[in-house]
Amino acid sequence: MSLYAPSLVVSRPDGRIGGPGDGFFHGDRRCLSRLEVDAPGIPVAPVGGGVTGADTAAFRAVLRGVGEHTADPAVTLERRRRVAPGRLTETLELVNSGPAEVAVRLTVMAASDFATMEQVKAGRATAETTAAADAAADGGGLVWTDRSMTVRLTSTQAPAAVDGPAGRLHHDVRLAPGARWSTELVVVAEDRSSVLFPPAPPDAALWRTPHLLSADRRFDHWVEQSAHDLRRLLLTDPQGDGDLFLAAGAPWFLTLFGRDSLWTARMLLPLGTELAAGTLRTLARRQGTVVNLETEEQPGKILHEVRREGVGLPPRYYGTVDATPLWVTLLHDAWRWGLDPEQVRALLPHAEAALAWMAEHGDADGDGLLEYVDHTGRGLSNQGWKDSGDSIRYRDGRIARAPIALCEVQAYAYEAARCGAALLRAFDRPGADRWEEWADRVRRSFRERFWVEDATGRYPAVALDADKKPVDSVTSGFGHLLGTGLLDADESAVLAARLCAPDLDAGFGLRTLSSQSVGFNPLGYHIGSIWPHDTAIAVQGLVRAGFPEAARGLARGLVAAAGAFDGRLPELFGGHGSAVDTRPTPYPASCRPQAWAATASISLLQSVLGLHADVPGGTLTVSPALAGEFGPLSVTGLAVAGEPMEITVQPDGTADVRAAAGLSVRTSAVQATSAVRTTSAVRTS
């Protein structure tokens, strides 16, 4: 896949666009459903290719039997692809390395069906759209048109013939020995409908570019590839003054998702606060103000997603229980990493509204817990991050009945209330005591209601059901509880041990559902698969809670998975595990690249370094408890308080930290303070 949001290209491994899910997409429409290159009567054999960057790819094939005087191929065809917003460029190059002149007819075959992304994802494109929109010859190219979009394909070399109804361009090429011929195919999509979110400017620089050099090159490559992919997932808020945010993932979710955008901005805070600021403001502009049962909007609530009309859910849909507390926590964490206090102050009214939503609407029955229910019967039946309809189930496989209170959402609510109180107190606004007391109530309610027991000991249920009874399955949700303050030390120790057990730890990351549960499916969307961001959250929670050794195996498994996917981790993959597979199994139709799978690399790096910032308090904590797994290492391109930061960890664990002047660098109690050296800020390119 090649990507530059809101456009992308999905093709076969040989570069051919023509499979059911393939296409050149722009703004959730498939502009081209076919783009193939052939030489009639000549076998064209692929020999290699793939992505070369976030928005580029290259493919090579040989034309067998043409100009050959030995068994060696003589003529090769190269396709070099680049995608930009609303534009696909593909350079075709024929090279004759043989001793004789050759003649080749090169045929470009193209089609468009203007299918929506929803139709393509559901496999309904051929049933609900015409097999291909009629193409018309347009000078030396082809053009397709429907009521809201026009797609033009041109070639810089004039074709010998154009067959409009068949969607074909024919080039007759003669090549002397050693000669080469090339043309550039240009596909432009003109979308006459309103654009939800324009692409980011080409020179947008919301974060510094990290460069990691560690003892595990798979980790280094994962960080590098993620940084490239994330820049191409950036979109602009048309209602804001240049505010940018990360789309959730390609190809299915190139739009604003509250939960996804918040988690990705939070994970990227070690690279700068600008993305967090843009994400917070983008969502604040759309924060709920009224009660609307159709869209699930409520005053103070942060939305779930924004889409075009006609994709199943309302265009602006608020059916999420966790985006609102996550918004408050991101504001707090961005402040701690050095977001301009005036920008924080401007967002505090939205934080107060979000906090009020938790108490007045999120906890609708006043029992001290956040819960959800789909009021329409047409929205999402589950409204946490595991939002598939079968994700919340009992250990025996039965599906839980709503209203549902998720375990991890109580941790988000507790943390948000504590973070909100800290912000209100720091900025001399009333209400801090109220939210600390509210957080304590959530903590008590959780301890009283969620804990259950099996043969191996106590653990928190994944949720409470409509009757307030525990839904007793064992899930990766444990990882989201750690390090939030919701649990005490003994409770955290119990969960640290459970996360390391082989029913959850698959060797490539955490299974979303224990392999011992009825209904476990290693290729189930939320019932046994592995999500990289989910595992990264658990690793960070374990480190924050003081269990780095428990985090070590999960961190190692994530890096192994990243290596297996060549540094571009998908949204999710199979939970079969390293005990049975040498490589993780891809999940069909997974987004790749996907924002929080990519930002998981930075979250993991933060965990490895034990990195925490408190710019208002004037401190920076570096405690590289996991560095031994990947060290020695050095990393540049980090940022704190708007200034560059570099960290080097020596083989003996000594850390050299170059950070903003005026910050006091602290280490954990297990390290001598003298083991960390600090200098003034150093500018990096």
Image (cartoon, helix red, strand yellow):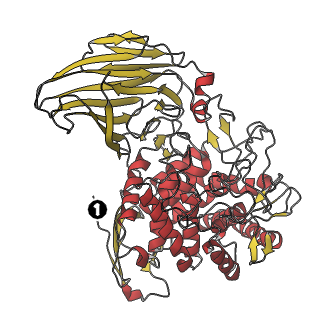
Q: Which residue lies furthest to the right in this view?
A: 467
In the structure shown, which secondary structural element does the residue marked by tag 1 occupy?
loop
Residue 237 at what x, y percent from top left? 51, 39
From the image, which quarter does the C terminus lie in? bottom left
Q: Position of 348 compared to 36: left or right?
A: right
Q: Which of 451 and 666 is in front in this view?
A: 451
List the residue tagged with mark 1. Answer: 684
Residue 23 at what x, y percent from top left? 47, 31
Residue 287 at what x, y percent from top left? 65, 45
Can you tell which quarter of the image residue 378 is in? top right
Q: Position of 45 compared to 342: left or right?
A: left
| Callout count | 1
Q: Image height check: is 214 above or below 359? A: below
Q: Which residue is drawn at 61% across and 35% down?
A: 307
Q: Which residue is drawn at 66% across and 45% down?
A: 303
Q: Image height check: is 411 above or below 99? A: below
From the image, which quarter does the N terminus lie in? top left
Q: Position of 171 compared to 327: left or right?
A: left
Q: Which residue lies furthest to the front in this view?
A: 70
Q: What type is the residue that disc 1 sits on?
A: Thr
Q: Nearer the viewer, residue 479 or 72?
A: 72
Q: Is residue 612 visible?
A: no
Q: Which of 179 and 71 is in front in this view?
A: 71
Q: Nearer the viewer, residue 633 or 502?
A: 502
For label 1, count other residues whose C-alpha is less than 10 Å away and answer few (under 14), some (14-19) or many (20+).
few
Can you tell which quarter of the image residue 101 is in? top left
Residue 509 at what x, y percent from top left? 55, 64
Q: Can residue 326 be seen in this view?
A: yes
